[in-house]
Amino acid sequence: MRRVVITGIGTVNALACGVPGTFQAFREGRSGIGPLDFRDADRLAIRIGAALRDWAPERHFKGNELPLLDRVTQYALVTGAEAVAMAGLPAGLGPRGGVILGTAAGGIQTWEDSYRAVFAEGKNRVSPLVVPRLMHNAPASHLSIRHGLTGPVLVVSSACASANHAMGLALQQIRAGAADVMLTGGAEAMLCFGGIKAWEGLRVLAPDACRPFSKDRTGLVIGDGAGVLVFEEEEHARARGARILAEVAGFGMTADAGDIVAPSAEGAARAMRLALADAGMGPEDIGYINAHGTGTLANDRTEAAAIRAVFAAPPPVSATKSMHGHAIGATGALEAIACILALSEGVLPPTLGFRVPDPECDLDVVANAARPATVTAALSNAFAFGGLNAVLAFRR
């Protein structure tokens, strides 16, 4: 079987625009959550999020490019450029390179602006570029165009598991010989009035902070951002002298086939076991888990039960959504980058806001400060509405 490694990573998120700043925020235990300041934020009951505070598109794009690019695509392109540069990818990959990205909402800001124009402002026309701006595949398509990748290119939209599903499918494409290099991960730009108002209706948003696994947790915090990783066939990477950050060792995905919103410990546990089996590893090989860890009562208790079902002695667990927010379709990519920090530098990112242990979340939570540890393998969990579970196993 062709082995797959990671040779480049890139990210923009509420912690930093770029991998170095994001790694530093993880080390320092710094939160990117703060007040929301977009249009009509004062009409929301929940007014916090993990936004990119100083995002300036004109720093990254020419003026004639921006009419085609919703923020979600902007994030993906900037992130992809960082990942490609880190990997030192050669030009001319063509059909041997591809892109699989996850996103839950696509160009939601473009949807909102167009609805405002038609319904609130009474306009009878919208820009002819609305459809190519808002379509879910726009970020993946623009990345393929920018980097000349003409192999497998598609988008995955499976709510909060989108990025993990995308990375798992990218792994499978390389293993199957359909490509040598895949840009993969996720992008999301849900922080706008309509995006948050919809989540308010679910009554799962925290009013002040995200506190995963803490007994006093009150919900999740939505975040924006993107993460792109360069997955590469190992021999291809070694032949060109690329620096290898980690191995993508295994992938497991399951469906609960139960409730559309309530999570299942059995489905989550099965996905973890499948990822371990695919990697040829046992539970004792895992030294760190980046949990889905949303900060809701139901998810955290269910995930803790699933982890305890798989691991007789659970390894350290952290939920970095307490720092970068829940970036929905992109969040798995941000958490994969956190796993790479653990594997490559021996730093376990913290779970911020952990104040009161919950007996129903009996785990070794990396609480409030980063922890040094020698880790040879890690799991990254993603569990989505719709009962969809996707777990990745990474190896140093």
Image (spheres, rainbow, N blue to C red):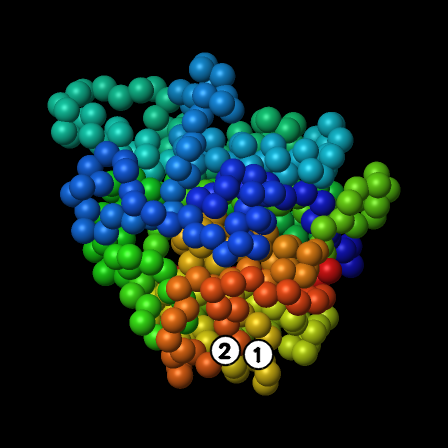
Type of amino acid under label 2: Leu
- The reply to whether residue 140 is visible in this rendering is no
**In the foreground, 310 or 11:** 11
Q: Residues within 10 Å of mark 2 (few under 14, many from 20)?
A: many
Location of residue 347 by image quarter: bottom right
Residue 252, horizontal then vertical, whole percent? 58, 65
Q: Which residue is mark 2?
A: 363
Residue drawn at x 45%, y 15% as measured from the top left: 63
Which residue appears farthest toward the top when viewing the image? 64
In the figure, is residue 210 to the left or right of 17? left
Q: Quadrant of the N terminus?
A: bottom right
Pick the front one: 355 or 302? 355
Q: Earlier in the sequence, mark 2 or mark 1?
A: 1
Per the image, label 2 sits on a secondary structure element best described as loop
The quarter of the rendered structure image containing the C terminus is: bottom right
Figure check: 359 above or below 80 = below
Q: Which residue is mark 1?
A: 314
- Which image quadrant is residue 344 in? bottom right
Quadrant of the rendered image containing residue 190: top left
Residue 141: image location, x then y, percent = 53, 32
Viewer can see residue 122? yes
**What amino acid type should be assigned to the residue bearing mark 1?**
Pro
Q: Nearer the viewer, residue 272 or 364?
A: 364
The image position of residue 191, as x and y in percent, is: 33, 42
Badge 2 vs badge 1, beta-carbon distance below 8 Å? yes
Q: Which residue occupies the extreme right position in the image?
A: 239
